[in-house]
Image: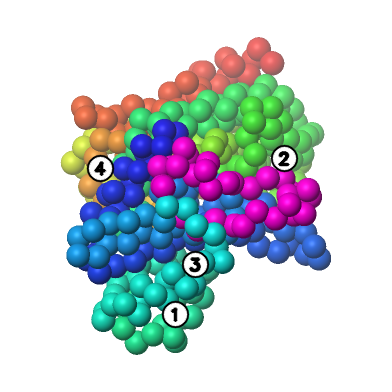
Amino acid sequence: MNKKFYKSNRNKVLNKIKDNSLLILFAGNAPKKTADEKYKFTPNRNFYYLTGIDEENHILVLSKFSGKIKEYLFIKEVDPIVEKWEGKTIRKEEVPEICDIEDVRYLGEFNNFIDKIISDNEEINIYLDLEKENSSYKYASEIKSKYYNLNIKNSFKLIGNLRLIKSEEEIERIRKAIEITIEGVETLMKNSRSGMKEYELEAYFDFICKKNGVNDFAFKTIAAAGKNATVLHYVNNDSELNNGDLILFDLGAQYKYYNGDISRTFPVNGKFTERQKEVYNAVLRVNEKVIKEMRPGVSFLELNSKAREWIAEECISLGLMTNKDEVSKFYYHSIGHSLGMDTHDIELENRDVILEAGMVYTVEPGIYIEEEKIGVRIEDDILITENGNEVLTKDMIKTIEEIETFMETR
Ligand code: GLY
Ligand code: MN
Ligand code: MN
């Protein structure tokens, strides 16, 4: 990513915050797993969005006083002993090249620096990334107990709203994540045989990801055969694939912190039964109808309601129910979500989003019939463009004919 991207993101944030403010963003650190083992570190996404730096513990500070803005990055002091074990960390002189911040200081100076600014001002707004239970909450209570002149504000949604619209470079990363995901899905489809375990098929996806330099997934892979596919977030992936089963895969590679998110459902043995075809085509029709509607100006909440109606109509045609109100027995999630550095790219609670060019949304209708051991979800990733949309997952096979033909050549 070009350093101008991070600079421009910070400028947008600085334009949105009030005067007399500090914005403090922590990179975060890896949580403990057990004993001396830690989980893999992944940066706070808003920190990364404003700096492009993916190391633990650094802190970004933006300030705006009397309309004057300043930017600071506080980095870890260099520790030659730790570096012998864990490798080099970022140097002061490297920071301007990555993200165009010139004023780089060490973490040891951070507390005094903040104390001085707070003491020098009668009243001050402190913007923190107050999302769920991250480290900013602890910091918020620490400084609140020290000072009386603070207004603590949440910058999470402010930055989150900016992240909804992707730049060209961000879209390129999502495209790459999708390309790898598609290669993974096609590879596992080619290797599908009854008698295997779900995790054996999943392993083909893992291999393709690793081979392409992916070091994390968008989320835990769902590999759900037969009845398991009717459990929305089934991730045990340890059942046997029976001849005649459908298997639902919902998965995504993460490429340089940008995610793909695809669901495909296919027959383990390569051939759909007549009933499976009916259900599959019902979901496919809704998938295609929703995608057709996606363009600038459309309310995503309204589209979500329409999709629910259409799925209800399909469920009636499939003979599953007689009244549309019963649809939640067979479909119980929303039609999609914004996709980006997070798979559910910033949860804006029930706030409606009006689609705009540059947004990326998933479209993922599903019908889940426990009694028939059939669960079908078909998920694509859609870029909203000036004139409509582009299906970023268009190279992934989708129709029954395409799937059966593809699997015939295994
Ligand atoms: N598996 C996450 C999603 O599709 O939203
Ligand atoms: Mn998904
Ligand atoms: Mn999704």
* Circle 4/circle 1 CB separation < 8 Å: no
> Pointer 2: what residue?
198
Which mark, by number, is residue 110? 3
- In the drawing, does residue 79 fall left or right of residue 150? right
Q: Residues within 10 Å of mark 4 (few under 14, many from 20)?
A: many
Closer to the N terminus: mark 3 or mark 1?
Answer: 3
Q: Residue at x 51, y 28 (%)?
A: 176
Q: Residues within 10 Å of mark 2 (few under 14, many from 20)?
A: many
The mark lying in front, picked from 4 and 2, is: 4
Q: Amino acid at mark 4?
A: Leu
Q: Residue 192's image quarter?
A: top right
Closer to the N terminus: mark 2 or mark 3?
Answer: 3
Real-space CA distance between mark 3 and mark 4, rounded to the nearest whole angstrom: 40 Å
Q: Position of residue 62 (x, y in %)?
A: 36, 59
Determine whether the residue tagged by mark 1 lies in a helix, strand or loop.
helix
Q: Residue 351's image quarter?
A: bottom left
